[in-house]
Image (cartoon, coloured by chain):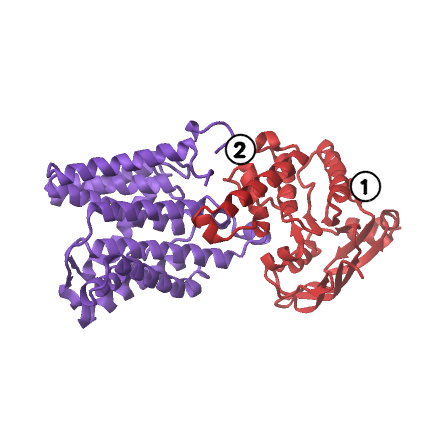
Chain colours: A purple, B red
Amino acid sequence: MRNWFNRKNLVMLLGIVLIYAVVQGLIMTDIMPPFYKLTLILMCIYIILSTSLNLINGITGQFSIGHAGFMAVGAYVSAIITAIMHGPLILGILAGAIVAALVGLLVGLPTLRLKGDYLAIATLGFGEIVRIVFLNMELVGGASGFTLPSRITWTWAFVLMVLSVLLMKNFVGSTHGRACISIRENEIAAESMGINTTKYKVMAFTMGAFFAGVAGGIYANYMYIIQPMTFSFLKSIDILVMVVLGGLGSITGGIAGAIVMTLVSALLAGVPEWRMVIIAVLLIGMMIFRPTGLFGTKEFSLNFLGKKGDK
Amino acid sequence: MPLLKIDNLSKSFGGLKAVSNLNIEINEGELVGLIGPNGAGKTTVFNLLTGVYDKTEGNLIFQGKEVSGLKPYQVTHLGMARTFQNIRLFSDLSVIDNVKIAYHQRAAYSTTSALLRLPSFYMGEKTIQKKAMDLLRIFHLEDKAEETAKNLPYGEQRRLEIARALGTEPKLLLLDEPAAGMNPQETNDLMNLIRWIREEFKLTILLIEHDMSLVMGVCERIYVLDYGMIIAQGVPDEIKNNPKVIEAYLGEEVVV
């Protein structure tokens, strides 16, 4: 336990609690307009999505573009449990995440033998398959969508987001995370250093799918309605853009990317016809002036607060 | 019983026989060299040993166990580690992370304890950190622990690659042209280093090399490979004067 409470972690905890309390206060006193609240909750969802995709694309170096598919699985499974079976919210989200992880495992085992472009195409196809399955499923309303009560509050979204990011960060900062990074750096060398590259690729992929499922569950239980179109290929690209913008391979970078993109989208909500144009211009500028993304592979850290040696 | 026994090993790529009927025995604690002209099949032998390629025929017995057909990481688990002819470091990672990754297979904590940061995680990380630092100290790289691997000078990158291979705690170390691209002074230092790590880590070493001063200087026994076949074997002095070896290296005209 002593390991947990160093100065750095305490400052981090304080910051997290502070952000939570300020927003919660503003919501409870009705000062915060609903649109802002929506944006903040979407931010939490996108932070989970971009961090989990970063685990696959940035940390392990496998190029997946089917992330919306896992989000859809999480969303629909949790919706079935909470709305049709009237189960508790947390059970719904957990079940959605677990099913998404199982699907990730099933998809990952064969496809992760592919490299680069081939893997991208396979995951792209997977995302579309998932969407079409839900499109044709009468139980969940088909194309017209599935309505369910909105039960996610700011507290739920924020706590789930912090937990998800913390778990993923813990994974990346361990020897298992280093094994994933070594695959990105040089697969042949990683294998000859005794790392079971297939196992770690599948592990990262499954874990990424799990947290995408969590995000999907939050989304479904907040938005009143889920439609297959929401989880199209474009959603996967949105998430990918956040990761690339923030920095492939940097957890904090992915978070920053998610925050920036959600904010830009929200700010441009008044000019929908210009939204995609402005975002595209921003991205082109970014790729010209800082192709590694905001953070590159570097992490923002509070290490400077810790005493020497207790990193 | 020899530590490594290569028994009648052959490897064909389509119609090309890269290695044919190879027989090599290495006893524990030996320092053996494998030499031969370019394209003789030396690196192919390494790739066969470490599971990168699968053999066409023959057996590879390491510590009494058949290793052909295993994946590279499984071979490493059994205690065989290698370096590469063209350096393959994790070039964008720090020097210490390169070595820490090699300790991964000995890491004593599970994914769960990593996710939940249980005490075994902190203990495991502490051990890895300490072992990695110790290894860097041996290779005089401790001051550069936080530096990015690709920014090291060439000679130090070579040393780091050997350090990383030792991180897997091998019994048999395979060095693929460790002196490639080094100047005479660096080669000399490397010779001393190879001798020293063999004593310190109680290693058996098989090395491929083109630099004759290194091979003749450190190896106790030498195998000479040409066109995938062993054409000579013996102690350095025998090899130096073997007409077949001179022929393979310099061509026929020289042999009078």
A195 or A44, which lies in front? Answer: A44
Disc 1 residue type (three-letter): Gly
Residues under labels 1 and 2: Cα distance? 34 Å
A153 or B169, which lies in front? Answer: A153
Tell me which corner region of the image, top left, top right, bottom left or bottom right, holds residue B20.
bottom right
Within 10 Å of the Cα at label 2, are there few (<14), some (14-19), or many (20+) other Cα atoms?
Answer: few
Circle 2 SS class: loop
Disc 2 residue type (three-letter): Glu
Circle 1 SS class: helix
**Tag 1 residue:** B217
**Tag 2 residue:** B146
Task: Tell me: residue A51, above or below residue A88.
Answer: above
B78 or B232, which lies in front? Answer: B78
Counting from the top left corner in percent of width and height, residue B231 is at 80, 58
Q: Quadrant of the N terminus of chain B?
A: bottom right
Counting from the top left corner in percent of width and height, residue B116 is at 43, 48
Residue reaching furthest front? A1
Disc 1 and disc 2 in contact, CB within 8 angstroms: no
Which mark is nearer the camera, 1 or 2? Answer: 2
Task: Tell me: residue B121, above or below residue B51.
Answer: above
| Residue at the image point whose x is 52% and y is 48% from the top | A186
- For disc 1, the chain is B
Tell me which corner region of the image, top left, top right, bottom left or bottom right, holds residue A269.
top left
Give left or right: position of B256 versus B110: right
| Number of numbered tags placed on the structure image | 2
